Image: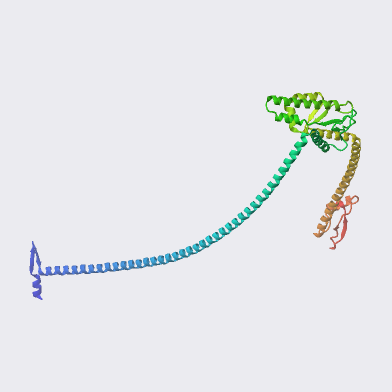
Amino acid sequence: MNDLFTILAEPVARLGATTITLGQVLSFIAVLFVALLIALVVSLWRSAKARAVAAAEAADHARDTEARMAGILQSQAEMQGRLGAVADVFGARQAELTQSIGQRLDAMTGRLGQTMTEQTRSTHESLAKLQERLAVIDTAQTNIQSLAGQVVQLQAILSNKQTRGAFGQSRMEAIVADGLPHGAYEFQATLSNGSRPDCLVRMPNDTPSLVVDAKFPLEAWNAIRAAEGEAAQKFAAQSFRRDIEVHIRDIADKYLISGETQDTAFMFVPSESVFAEIHENFEALVQRAHRARIVIVSPSLLMLSIQVIQSILKDARMREQAHLIQGEVIRLMEDVTRLDERVRKLQNHFGQATRDIDDILVSSSKVTKRGQKIEALEFGAAPAEAEGDTAGRNNAKPDAVRIADSKTGQLRLRVVEEGDA
């Protein structure tokens, strides 16, 4: 043991004044070894801790990865479900679309067929109407041909003076007969000088009659329309003027009789075109007719004149019946006066009935009030009511009953006067 201590005490090195022994070196080595061992242990502990942390992190990362994989799988499953639902929806929509398209095609086919049917029916109807119109056109053509024949016959009639005069006279007679009452006119009447005008209109109040004579200068007017060249037209105009002047002179000489006929006579021209030709291009003839007291009238003017005469006749009849109308008006006023008196009497009756109804309503209101008080068991009379009952008993009428006795507790009815309000 001593030897060991001696060995350990032996100097091994010298650093300046310091002597380093073997024991110090061994101690230093032992300390260094222990430090290295501690450092190794710490290093191993730290390495183990780091590995544990890394393992924990790896485990966490693995768990996160597993969770993410599970989420991804779940999302994939949801996506597959959604894709399946979308596929189902698309399939259903496609089926609905196919069905809708089929229905629309069927409807369109039906409408197209219906339209074709309607178009066919419309075409048939149009063809039938066209055939009807063609038949109407054929009938119209037949009527036109018949009318053409009638026009030819009319032309043949108008080419003859006698038939043409009969045509003008018939138009004049139709206008006069339509406008005047029977007995107010006479056709082909004989005047005092032996002449016979076409129509004689009887004027009211024993005044002279009005002469209407029909004239139809057709040849001269046709010559004017057919004339070509200034000389031919001038010659035709002179012929037309001469014919009209002859007609005016004949009417003035034969039919204007003082005291028997009016101072004015009508020359009836049964053609509006001839009448217009006279007034447009032969003003001198119109003035000459006025000076001869002859009025040239067309069918429309004759119709207007007949209407004026009809109004005059109606006024004359009204004046003749004026006294009858006056008597009827007087009797009507008497009836109105009696009606006014009776209405006033009825008004008085209504007024009296209204006042009686108001009195009845006042009495019924009072009876109702008394009944309400009886129903409410209001016993006895108020002092004011007692005084009023004493003051107005002589002038009031009984209209209700009231409970008066309240001392014995028994109900007793008495007459209540109208002044007990």
Vertical arrangement, residue 37 with respect to residue 415, above or below: below
Give the x, y percent position of residue 133. Answer: 67, 48
Give the x, y percent position of residue 311. Answer: 83, 34
Q: Nearer the viewer, residue 421 or 114?
A: 114
Q: Is residue 222 left or right of residue 386?
A: left
Vertical arrangement, residue 127 with respect to residue 148, above or below: below
Q: Is residue 387 visible?
A: no
Give the x, y percent position of residue 340. Answer: 88, 42
Q: Is residue 35 left or right of residue 367?
A: left
Give the x, y percent position of residue 347. Answer: 87, 45
Residue, far bottom:
1
- Seen at 87% across and 61% down, the residue is 412
Vertical arrangement, residue 210 with respect to residue 19, above or below: above
Q: Nearer the viewer, residue 171 or 40?
A: 171
Q: Is residue 273 visible?
A: yes
* Image quadrant containing the N terminus: bottom left
- Residue 183 location, quadrant: top right
Q: Nearer the viewer, residue 88 or 163?
A: 163
- Residue 249 location, quadrant: top right
